[in-house]
Image: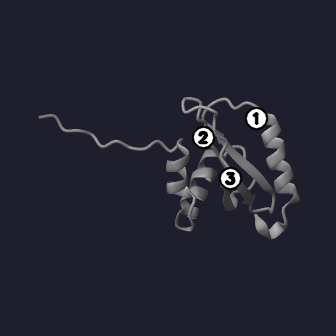
Amino acid sequence: MSKKLPKFAPLTLDFTFKKAFANEQCTELLLFLLNTFLDRVLKEPIIDVKVIHTVQLGKTRKKRGAVFDIQCEDASGARFIVEMQVEEQKHFIKRSLFYLCMAVASPRGSL
């Protein structure tokens, strides 16, 4: 009898990502993950994160896209958005500009 390996849910799925990172207990883990992946491009480490609960879904089940938007603040006070794309998204530039405008217009304390 062969031993079955456990199946793991991929972190690229919206549901799995939110279960793993979109809660207060996992903030430190999310900070570690982002700082590790973005180490070479960040001038300062990320010190605060907020998961934005907006997901762009495709029109059909096969075209379902997962988008994870995270607002970040680094040690120097700079605020920016990290977005993970699993597949090519139509209107990516327009949506990114919209999110950027929302981040710029949001009050400082609501990051």
Where residue 69 appears, as percent x and y from the top left, is 68, 49
Which amino acid does the dot numbered 1 rest on? Phe
Q: Which type of secondary structure does the marked residue at label 1 adopt? A: helix
Q: CA distance from mark 3 to mark 2?
A: 13 Å
Earlier along the polypeptide chain: callout 3 or callout 1?
3
Residue at the disc numbered 3: 70
Q: Which residue is mark 2?
A: 66
Q: Residues within 10 Å of mark 1 (few under 14, many from 20)?
A: few
Q: Nearer the viewer, mark 3 or mark 1?
A: 1
36 sits left or right of 5 in the view:
right
Residue 76 appears in which quarter of the rendering? bottom right
Q: Amino acid at mark 3?
A: Ile
Image location (x, y in percent) of residue 51: 65, 57
Q: Earlier in the sequence, mark 2 or mark 1?
A: 2
Give the CA separation, mark 2 to mark 1: 13 Å
Check disc 1 and report the residue beneath it. Answer: 92
Mark 2, Cα crowd under 10 Å, few <14 / some 14-19 / many 20+, is many
Give the amino acid type for the residue marked by disc 2 in the picture. Ala
Residue shown at 27%/40% (left/top)?
5
Quarter of the figure with residue 8: top left
Residue 66 in the image: x percent, y percent?
Answer: 60, 40
Identify the residue at image location x=81%, y=58%. Answer: 78
The quarter of the displayed image where residue 60 is located: top right
Q: Is residue 11 left or right of residue 49?
A: left
